[in-house]
Image (tube, grey):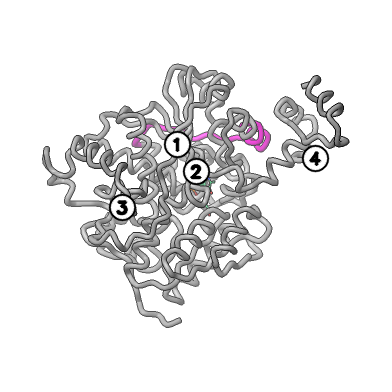
Amino acid sequence: MQDTGTKLGQGSAQLRCIGCGALHQSADRDFRCPDCGDLFEVIYPQWKSSQRGSALDPIVLGNVWRQRRASHALADRSGVWRFRELLPNLGDLESVISLSEGNTPVYELAKCARIARMERLFAKHQGMNPTGSFKDTGMTVAATLARLEGFRWVACASTGNTSASMAAYAARGGMRSVVLIPEGQVSWGKLSQALDYGAVTCQLKTDFDGCMRVLNEVVQRMPVCLLNSVNPYRLEGQKTAAIELLEQFNWEAPDHIIVPGGNLGNSSALGKACLEMRELGLISRLPKISIIQAEGANPLVRAMRENGGKKLSPMRADTMATAIRIGNPASWKKAVRVLEATGGTVEQVSEIEIALAKAEIGADGIGCEPASAVTLAGLKKLVKQGFVKPNELVVLILTGHMLKDPDFTIKFHRGDLFPDKKDEAAILKAQQRAPIVLDANAETVLKVLEQA
Ligand code: F0G
């Protein structure tokens, strides 16, 4: 592989450094500001001049987006590119790499609402994306732009979902992909996806943060497009989940959106979308965006509590919710800005609280992976604290599909998740339903049913 010096930048959109504010047309391969080393965000200077009745008028936008739902064109069938007025302008939609991502459902969670002492509760299930996680919404944009810029290789470090998604979009787009994952810390479901979609899959003897460190060096030394969420075009795609959510709520913002926090790209993207929608007049008030972390992987919670989010100290992370086992989140400054701009908060939840919440969501007929369940576990705490009122409208963002990590679910129901915490884990019993092994006759089955 030769270094062609390829950079990534896109037409009318500009890159602005979140640290020093410098404006750039394109980014170096590490997506860091050459002046101060901070991350970029995508901005659209031409929006400022938009007028009523123009293509960015909220009524015009709402109508155009609705009409596209009846279209069969590839870009219109995508729940990301359907909102392309708020994305980098591709010019030619033929170049889109899409798996019909987005278009994810909002479910009402009746039992979970009662458990959390809410009148009503909703979940937007981003796990219903083509590769089973919210990453697809960002990947369609970042992979499309990578290919347009001439990259033949894409790369990421991952706790599993990014790698699964990136490998799929690279395969669809005729690019090669390389993934760095922490050995022994990625669920089989996610690892098997990367393998099947043809990624060069490297299991490194380190954690996610270590993989990220190695990857940063790799991208400096070969012409490969970095598709982690430091790539600001990923976040532009992930932004559309909030736009679609607001459309599903008829442009009435919910009071709260609750999202898991790992590398903190997703919370940043959802917040950016809400601020932009308000700027464009699509919504008149902002939902509070709150971020929930696992107790063992809580660098943002610590930073907010210890110094109001001015400084984040990296930590060694540990949680069974492997998707969010991250101690040095890249996008923490963006996430702090979202918390401040929307009035949201942070909370942390224990391993047992995560496991319980996941089973409770399951009992509503909705599967999700452990990292997604932190949202319900966190909500319960926020209601107890009075931060969320029972009559408020809350939407949980479920980020990954239950089948990503069936091992966790099986262990939960067999009572094997917490071998060293039997007493504490006793509260899980009511939700546990281990499979029952029986002789093959009707009598034994009927007997079991009587007891049920
Ligand atoms: N939920 C799931 C299911 C995830 O896979 C991730 C992140 C998150 C939540 C956290 O989102 O990082 O934007 O704050 N997974 C990444 C990965 C890190 O490599 O798949 P975040």
**Is residue 353 rendered magenta in the image?**
yes
> Which residue is identified by label 1?
105
Rendered location of residue 254, percent (x, y): 38, 27
- Crowding at dot 1, Cα within 10 Å, few <14 / some 14-19 / many 20+, comes out as some
Give the numbered dot on residue 73: 3
Amino acid type, residue under disc 2 in the picture: Met
Structural distance between the alpha carbons of marks 4 and 2: 32 Å
Q: Which residues are magenta?
A: 341-357
In the visual, does 281 lie left or right of 7? Answer: left
Structural distance between the alpha carbons of marks 1 and 3: 21 Å
Which is more N-terminal, label 2 or label 4?
2
Amino acid type, residue under disc 4 in the picture: Pro
Which is more N-terminal, label 2 or label 1?
1
In the visual, does 251 lie left or right of 206? Answer: left
**Which of the two discs, 4 and 2, sits closer to the camera?**
2
- Crowding at dot 4, Cα within 10 Å, few <14 / some 14-19 / many 20+, comes out as few
Structural distance between the alpha carbons of marks 4 and 3: 52 Å
Label 2: element kind:
helix
The residue furthest front is 442
Asked if disc 4 is less than 8 Å from ligand 1, the answer is no
Residue 433 picture quarter: top right
Give the numbered dot on residue 169: none
The residue furthest bottom is 2
